Image: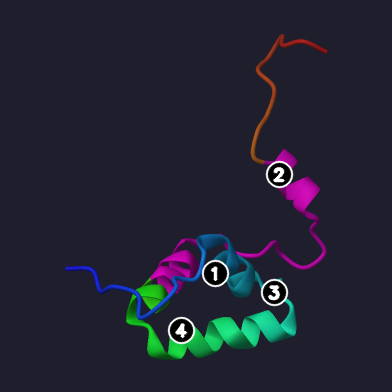
Amino acid sequence: MTPACISEPVSWLALEQLALGELPAARARAVQDHLARCPACRACLDRIEADAPAPPAPGCSRASTARSSWSRAPGGCG
């Protein structure tokens, strides 16, 4: 059985932004305070963190790593 949130659930987007360090400081503190008391929302953050891709290697940009994951088929369009 999945636990229920203790109050107003934290949005998935806010949890993702927290995991990426993209939430403004005041909002991050409020979310972290909620997570300290709420096993349901904490479980969601744990799932997000477990599914998060590894950061790019130092010196690599996201654009270059994205391009390296595909290649053109021989004889493809220009």
Q: CA distance from mark 4 to mark 2?
A: 33 Å
Question: Disc 3 or 1, which lies upstream in sequence?
Answer: 1
* Cβ atoms at labels 4 and 2 below 8 Å apart: no
**Other residues around mark 1 within 10 Å, as few (<14) / some (14–19) / many (≥20):** many
The one nearer the camera, 49 or 11, is: 11
Q: Which residue is mark 2?
A: 66
Q: Which mark is residue 35?
A: 4
Q: Tell me the amino acid under the disc marked 4.
A: Leu
The quadrant of the rendering that contains the C terminus is top right
Q: Which residue in the protein does label 1 denote?
A: 15
Q: CA distance from mark 3 to mark 2?
A: 25 Å
Residue 47 magenta-drawn? yes
User: N-terminal of the two: label 3 or label 4?
Assistant: 3
- Element marked by disc 1: helix
Q: Residues within 10 Å of mark 4 (few under 14, many from 20)?
A: many
Which residue is depicted at the point 35% across and 81% down? 6
- Residue 28, position as x, y percentages in the image: 64, 82
* Mark seen at residue 1: none
Give the mark, 3 or 2, whose residue is nearer the N terminus.
Answer: 3
Mark 3 lies on a secondary structure that is loop
Q: Residue at x 79, y 47 (%)?
A: 63
Magenta-tinted stretch: 44-68
Q: Callout 2 environment at 10 Å: few (<14), some (14 to 19), or many (20+)? A: few
Question: Residue 46 is drawn in which quadrant?
Answer: bottom left
Q: Reading the chain from its start, which is encountered first: label 4 or label 2? A: 4
